[in-house]
Image (tube, rainbow, N blue to C red):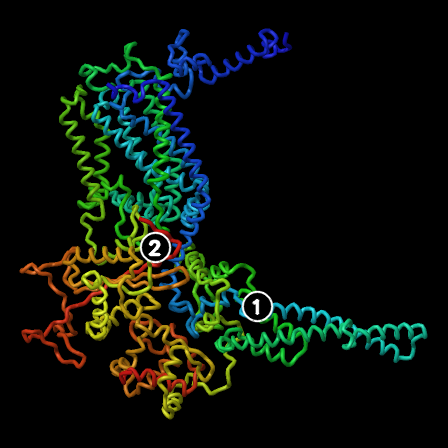
Amino acid sequence: MSILPFPSFLDDVREKGLKKAVLEGVDETVQRITAGMNIQDIREALRGDPPSRRPNPRLSPHADGFWLHMRPGYFHQDMTGIYPTFRLGWLSTYFVVFETITGLLLMLWYTPSPELAYGNMLKILNNVPLGQFIRDLHRLGAEAMVLIVALHMMRTWVTGSYKKPRQFTWFTGVLLLTITGLLSFTGYLLPWDQLALWAVTIGASMAEATPVIGEQVNLLVRGAPELGANGLLRFYLAHVLLLPLLLFIFTGVHYYKVIIHGHSLPPRVENIGEDTAKRVPLDKRVYFIPDVLTNELMWLGVTTFIMVVLCIWFYHAPLESHADPQNTPLGTTAPWYFLWIQGALKLGDKFFWGILFPTLALGALSLLPYLDVTPSRRYAHRRISLSVAMGLVSFTTVLSYMGLPEFAVATAAETEILHELTMEPAHNHVGKMRTVPYAQLVPGAYTTLQLESDNPRAAVEEFNEEMAGRIVWDPNQEGGKFVTEYDFVEFRLTSTDHLINMPASFRTVPDDAPQLYSVLKTFAHELEERHGELPGARGMIVVSDYQPGLRRVDMAIIWDGVEIENGRAKLDETGNPIPLLVRDAEGNVRMMQDADGNVLLDEAGNPIPVQERRIYTRHIYLHVDSAYFD
Amino acid sequence: MLINRFVINSIEGRILAGITMFVAVMILVGWVAINEPARMASFEEQHLGRSIERGGELFAANCSTCHGKDSLGIAGRAPALRNPQLFGFNFIDAVNGQILGLERQWNDLDTQLETLNTDRGALTAELGSGTVTAERQTEIATRLTEINAQINPDDPESIAGRIAALQAQLEPLYAERDTQLMALEQAMLADYLPKYNQMRAAADSGGVTEKFSFTVYLDQDADRLAQVGWGGDLAGYIRTTLIHGRPGSNNLWPQAMVAWSQTGGGPLRADQIDDIVNYILNYNKGDAWTLEDLYAVQQFARLPGSGGAGPAVATLGTDVDSAVTAVAALTGDADRGKQLYEGQARSQANARFGCSGCHMGGSQAPDTELTWANVTGQRLNEAQFAGWTPEQYLIHSIVLPNEYIVTGYSSGVMPANFGEQMTAQDMADIIAYLRSYAEGG
C-alpha cells in the first residue's frame, strides 16, 4: 500500500502491470485535456466510425471544455456546405487569429515613434529573416479581413439571417465590422511612410468637421493639430490594445449568440416565420467532432496555403518614402475601404458627407433588423430589402470610384504626365522612367521629336541646328530677354535644378537602350493624348552622370501656352484653344522679331504675335542598386 | 447536391488535404527562409541606393549653393566634399609610410645618442673636477671608451653608424617623396595641406625631430579625419557636421554652416540627414582617387590659423572713396577678372573668390550677365545713387555688401570681407569683367 492517502501510480503499476498502467494514465490525461474524449474515442472519430459508448463522448468537449464551448456540438446538414455561409464568418475569425499572430511578430521589431518607425520598417525588410514575409502576410491579411467581414455582412443581409431572433447578433456584427475597419485604418499609419501619413490624414480629416467639438475631436484623434509623435502613439495603442480588446470581446458575444440561436438555415428549408435552427432532426445532424472539425482544419491549411502563395509570388506590402508632413504627394487617397467617404466628401459639405452621412449609414445598418421586421426570409418576399442591399453595394462602389484621384480632381496635364513617368513606387505602381535598367540609362539628351519622323537621326540633327538659331521669349526672366530655345532649356535646367552637365546637343536613343526608347515612346504618346492642353509639345529627357553609380534624369515638356480651365484647354467660339500671348508692360501683344529687332511678318504680311512658350520640368536621381520594378 | 455538403465529403480526404496543405506551407516557408539572406542583402543595397537618390535631391536643394552643385566646393565659401582628402586617400602613403618607419627608428637612436652624449659630458666633467679616486677613474675611462665606440659613425654596429645607415636608406626615399610632393604642388597652392610650407621650412632647417614631425604631418593631414583629430568614422563626422553645422566657423569662413538637423534646430529629419550622408559617402572612390580629382577641388577644408598667409600687399579695405580713386587710375583686364570671379585665379592678396557660385541665374544673387545693365539702367536712376558712377556703385557693393540690398535678395548673405582680400588691380579687373557684358562680351 501506498503511504499516500490515495492510490498512487506505483500502486497501479503493482496492481495492473507497467504497460497497462501507463496506457491508462495516458488515456486519462488525454481525456482530461479534451474534456471528455479518450484515445479510443478520438480514434473512432477520426476513422469516421460512430461513437462506441453512451452518452456520446464527442459532445462532452462542447459541454465541459473551454475552447469548444463556443461551438455548437452539431450543425444542421443544410448549412455545412459552401452555401449559404460561404465560410465567411469562419474566415473572419481565421483572420482575427492570423492577424494577431503576425501582428505580435511584427511588434517585436517596431517602435511607435516618428524618428524610429520608418527605420524599423527598413530593418524589418532588410535585416529580419522572414521579416518581409510576415509583414506581407499581416498587410494582406488585414485587407482581406476588411473585405471578408464586409462580404459576411452582405451575405447575412441577403439570406435574411439578421431577422428575429438574431437581431442582436447582427448588431454585434456591425460593431465588429466597424472595429475591423478601424483596426485596418489605425494599422495603415504605423509604417510612417508617405502612403500611410497621407492616407490617414485624408481618412481622419473629417474629425474636425464634427460640430461644436470638432477641434477637440481632432486633437483627441491626432494628438496634435497634425499627425505627429502623439498621433502615431495613439494610433499604435489603438491598433495593438484598445481595438483588439474590443474585437475579442465582441467576437465572443457574436459567437455566444450563434450558440444560443444556432446557425440560421437557408431560407428555403424553413417555413416562413419559423426558426428551426435549434431543433435539428437526428438525421440532419452533422457532428462537430469529427466532421466539422476536420473540415475546418482542412480549410485552415488551405487558407494559410493561399495566403503564403500570395505573399511569396503575388503580393508585397507597399512601403513608400519616409512620411513628410510638408510634402503632399500627387494622387493621395484614403485606404480603399474608406474611399467611399472620400468620394462622398467630394459631393459637398464636409460635415454632412464626412460625419453625418457615414454615421447615419452605420446607424441604419445597425438598426436594420429592427427596421425590417417582415417575417419571411425567402428571397422572393424580400424585394425591397434585397434592392436596398444591391443599391447600397452600387452606391458604395460609385462613391469609392468618386474617391479616386481621377475623379473631379483637376491636375495640369504636364504635371500629370511627368508624375506618371517618374513617380516613386506607390499604390503598386512605379514611374516607368525608374524601371529603365541602369545600363540603358545612357547619358545624353533625347527628344520626343525622334518619334515623329521616319528618319529619326536626321530629324534630331535638324532640330539641333534649328534650335541654335530659333528665338523664343523667356517670360520667366525679370525684365525679359530673348534666348534661343536651347539656351532656354539649359537655363531653366541649370539654374533651377542644378544640373552639372548639359549635353551639347540632342541625339537619338542608342539601339541598345530599348527600355529608354520605350519610355520616350510612352512620353510622346502621353503628350499626344493631352494635345489639347499641350499644343506643339515636345518632350525631352536628359540623362547625366552625377556620382559613381548615380545618374540624374531630367524630363522637360515645352509647349505653346494655352488658356486652361479645370485641367482642360479653354476653347473659343470656333472650338480652338486660346493661345497665351506675351505682352509687354503696357499690355500690348509682343510681335516676333529677328535678332536685329525688325518685326517679322507672316505670309499674309501681318506681324506674328509671340505665343508664350512654357516649360515644365521634373527630375529624379537613379542609383544603380535601386532596382525599381513594374 | 455538392454545394450543400463539405467540399471533400470523406473524412480521410479532408485529413489528407489538410495535411498536404500544412506540409506545403512548411515547405514554402522553408524555401523562403533559405532565400532570406540573399534577399535581405539585395534589399539592403536597394534601400541604400534609394537613400543615395534622395540624398542627391536634398544635396541639390540645400547644400549645393555653398558646396557647389558638383560638390567640389566654392572658393571662399565652403569646402569640397568630393575630395580625396575627406575620404582619407593619401597620395604619398606608400613612400611616406616607409619613411615614417625609418624615421621612428632614427628618432629612437637619436634619443639614445643624446643620452650617451649627456653621460659623456657628465663623466668628463667628473673626471675634470680632480676629486675622483683612481678606482673611479678607471671606471669612467672604461665607460667613456664604451660611449666613444657607440658614437663612432665609422663603426656600422654603433648607434651613430646605424643612424648613418638609416640616413643612407632614407635619402632615396626622401627624393622619391619630394618627386611625389612636386606632383601635389598645384593642389597645395590651392590650400591642400595648408601648413606644408611651414613644416617644410622647419624640416629643412632643423634636426631629426622636425623631420620626423614633417613626415607625421604628411601622413596625417592628407586625411581630414586625422587632421581634425576625429576619433570616429567618416559617416559619423559628416553626420555630426550636418546635425550641428559649424557654428564656430566664422573664423574660417565668411558664412557659418547652419545646423541642418531638426535635432540641432534645423529643417531636416534624421532620415534625411542619413540620406545626405549616404550621398556624400557615395563619392568615395576607394583606391581609385587620382591627382585629377585632387586638382578638381575648388576649395579645400581649412584649419584654424592656416589661412591667408599671402604676400603683404595693400588691400582695398572698406574705404570706398579712396578705392574708387585707386581703381580709376588702373586699367582692368576682363579675362583675369573673369578668372577671379569664377575662383580660378587668386587675387594679389592670395585669396580666392567664388562670386559666380552665387551670382548666376539670379535666384540667390543678381545675375552676373545682367549686373552692368541693371546698375546703369536701374540702380543709378534711384535718388540715393544720384551722381554715382557704375564703378563707384560696384566697388561700394563689393566692399560694403550689406549697406544696400537690391529688392528681392537678403542682407548678410554676401561676405563683407572682400575688401581685405583684394587689391585695386583685382577690383579693376573684376569691374572690367562685369562691364564686358555691356559691351556684348
Location of residue A175 by image quarter: top left
**What residue lies at 27% left-to-right and 49% top-to-bottom?**
A332
- Nearer-the-camera pick, B276 or A457: A457
**What residue lies at 30% left-to-right and 87% top-to-bottom?**
B388
- Nearer-the-camera pick, A612 or B422: A612
Say yes or no: labels 1 and 2 on the same chain: no
Q: Is residue A38 above or below residue A152?
A: above
Q: Residues within 10 Å of mark 2 (few under 14, many from 20)?
A: some
In the rendered image, the quadrant that contains the N terminus of chain A is: top right
Location of residue B143 by image quarter: bottom right
Disc marking residue B93? 1
Can residue A5 be seen in this snapshot? no
SS label for mark 2: loop
SS label for mark 1: helix
Looking at the rendered structure, the number of numbered marks drawn on it comes to: 2
Per the image, the residue denoted by label 2 is A437
Q: Is residue A148 above or below residue B250?
A: above
Name which residue type carries label 2: Pro
Q: Are marks 1 and 2 in contact (CB under 8 Å)?
A: no
The percent coordinates of residue A514 (x first, y second) are 29, 56
- Nearer-the-camera pick, A569 or B314: A569
The percent coordinates of residue B404 (x first, y second) are 33, 78
The percent coordinates of residue A572 (x first, y second) are 7, 60
The percent coordinates of residue A426 (x first, y second) are 31, 48
In this image, A619 relative to B185: left or right? left
Can residue B392 be seen in this snapshot? yes
Name which residue type carries label 1: Asp
